[in-house]
Amino acid sequence: MHPLVRPLLIPALLAVGALPGTARTPTPEELGRIEAALRSAGYVAWGTIDVRPQGDRIAVEGARKVEDGPRQEVSLEPTTMRVTGEAQDPPG
């Protein structure tokens, strides 16, 4: 093996292996369903929405039930779009 191949190959393989573990943004169809579920649960505003790579939940950061109310991190079950968890967002 050429001496330069190994130092380049290992980081490239690690980067490719890490990609499936990252959350993704929802598709337009998913986004419509997620926003409808959040409104139905009483939320009026929210921030970042991530679909987890395992497909077991959708995480919504900065969700609020009133415009200047406390921020919550909300978890949704992707099949039913049911809220399965609510926790206070950390400050910041």
Image (cartoon, helix red, strand yellow):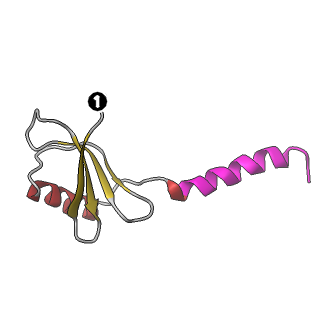
Residue depicted at 34% across the width and 61% down the height = 57
Query: Which residue, as the protein is rendered here, is positioned at the far bottom?
Result: 79
| Image quarter of residue 3 | top right
Q: Is residue 11 left or right of residue 80?
A: right
Image spot of residue 58 (x, y percent): 31, 58
- The quadrant of the rendering that contains the N terminus is bottom right
Type of amino acid under label 1: Pro
Decide: is 73 above or below 51. Answer: above
Image spot of residue 51 (x, y percent): 36, 57
Q: Is residue 25 left or right of residue 3?
A: left
Image spot of residue 43 (x, y percent): 12, 49
Say which of 37 and 69 sits in front: 69
Image spot of residue 64 (x, y percent): 15, 42
Residue depicted at 62% across the width and 55% down the height = 16
| Image quarter of residue 83 | bottom left
- The quadrant of the rendering that contains the C terminus is top left
Say which of 58 and 88 sits in front: 88
Identify residue for label 1.
Answer: 91
Magenta span covers which residues?
Answer: 1-19
Taking the magenta stretch, the answer to whether it contains residue 2 is: yes
Residue depicted at 43% across the width and 53% down the height = 23
Residues packed near mark 1 inside 10 Å, few (<14), some (14 to 19) or many (20 plus): few
Q: Secondary structure at mark 1?
A: loop
Q: Is the stretch drawn in magenta largely helix, strand or loop?
A: helix
Q: Is residue 36 left or right of residue 21?
A: left
Residue depicted at 27% across the width and 38% down the height = 89
Taking the magenta stretch, the answer to whether it contains residue 85 is: no
Decide: is 32 above or below 68. Answer: below
Query: Which residue, as the protein is rendered here, is positioned at the far top?
Result: 92
